């Protein structure tokens, strides 16, 4: 086997191995990058990178290292799920940066969070005036959660004494890429005859439907392969 062939084989093996380990660790590593998740992701990335192109190290040894580290990371994740103290030390904890409209200087220093970072994070939440903020909390994954003061909060139907609409549904995908999603039909007690009738109203077949979904209001949305737009807008 040539060196190029070995690199190609090791690269594919590294991707497959990292994918398996990531699946075992769960999606939280992707969605909420806490301190533990950051360390796990960086270390696993380094190990798989060596597996991909470092031909001086045996692929078996790197695979053993990858599996062992994956097991360690999984055990730490399980410990975090079982123990609040473990979560505190492994994943960090929320830090209040603004309380009752007052900036908490000591907490800012402990979190090593600057006023520039605070202002930037607030602007990303569409808050440009700090006097609009009642509470600001720095979450373990690094993002900022805000609670605005009552005068600056969005008005709700309850505030205006407007009756709420009827019960809403969770969106259900029915057709994708011209194929019926049978699992969703069965799990939501929907009938094929009903779906076929709705499709026939558009004078088309299932194969003509690119995407179909039942929305939160119970209404159907269809998107067809042929968009039926006579004058499409085109940008050069």
Image (cartoon, helix red, strand yellow):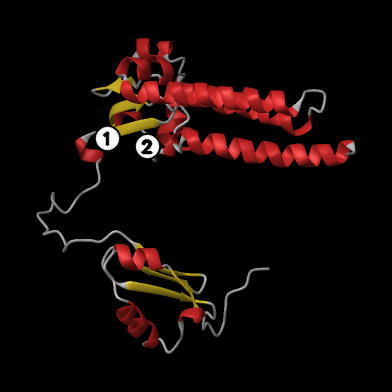
Residue 6 — which label?
none
Task: Tell whether label 1 touches label 2 (CB within 8 Å).
Answer: yes
User: Dot 1: what SS?
Assistant: strand
Query: How crowded is the residue under tag 2: few (<14 C-alpha within 10 Å), some, or many (20+)?
Result: some
Query: How crowded is the residue under tag 1: few (<14 C-alpha within 10 Å), some, or many (20+)?
Result: some
- Res. 214 visible in picture: no
| Picture coordinates of residue 56, whole percent (x, y) | 82, 23
User: Dot 2: what SS?
Assistant: loop
From mark 2 to mark 1, how far is it between C-alphas? 9 Å
Residue 148 — which label?
1
The residue lying at 28 percent from left, 64 percent from top is: 188
- Name of the residue lying farthest toward the right: 2
| 33 in relation to 5, above or below | above
Quadrant housing the N terminus? top right
| 218 in relation to 230, above or below | above
| 15 in relation to 43, above or below | below
| Picture coordinates of residue 24, whole percent (x, y) | 49, 35
Left of 98 or right of it: where is 179?
A: right
Q: Which residue is mark 2?
A: 127
The residue lying at 48 percent from left, 30 percent from top is: 33
First of labels 2, 1 by sequence position: 2
Observer-nearest residue: 59 or 29?
Answer: 59
Observer-nearest residue: 1 or 12?
Answer: 1
| Picture coordinates of residue 53, whole percent (x, y) | 78, 32
Quadrant housing the C terminus? bottom right
- Res. 134 visible in picture: yes
């Amino acid at each position: 086997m040539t060196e190029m062939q070995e690199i190609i084989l090791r690269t594919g093996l590294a991707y497959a191995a990292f994918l398996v380990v990531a699946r075992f660790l769960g999606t939280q590593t992707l969605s909420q990058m806490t301190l533990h998740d950051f360390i796990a992701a960086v270390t696993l990335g380094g190990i798989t990178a060596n597996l991909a192109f470092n031909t001086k190290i045996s692929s078996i040894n790197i695979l053993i290292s990858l599996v062992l580290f994956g097991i360690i990371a999984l055990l730490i994740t399980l410990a975090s799920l079982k123990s609040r103290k473990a979560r505190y030390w492994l994943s960090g904890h929320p830090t209040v940066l603004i309380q009752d409209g007052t900036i908490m200087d000591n907490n800012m220093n402990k979190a090593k969070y600057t006023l520039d970072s605070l202002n930037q994070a607030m602007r990303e939440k569409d808050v440009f005036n700090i006097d609009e903020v009642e509470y600001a909390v720095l979450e373990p994954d690094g993002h900022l959660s805000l609670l605005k003061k009552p005068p600056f909060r969005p008005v709700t139907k309850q505030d205006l004494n407007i009756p709420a609409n009827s019960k809403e549904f969770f969106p259900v995908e029915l057709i994708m890429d011209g194929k019926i999603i049978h699992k969703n039909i069965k799990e939501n007690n929907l009938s094929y005859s009903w779906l076929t009738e709705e499709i026939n109203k558009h004078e088309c077949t299932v194969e003509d439907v690119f995407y179909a979904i039942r929305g939160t209001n119970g209404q159907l949305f269809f998107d067809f392969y042929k968009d039926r737009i006579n004058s499409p807008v085109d940008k050069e």
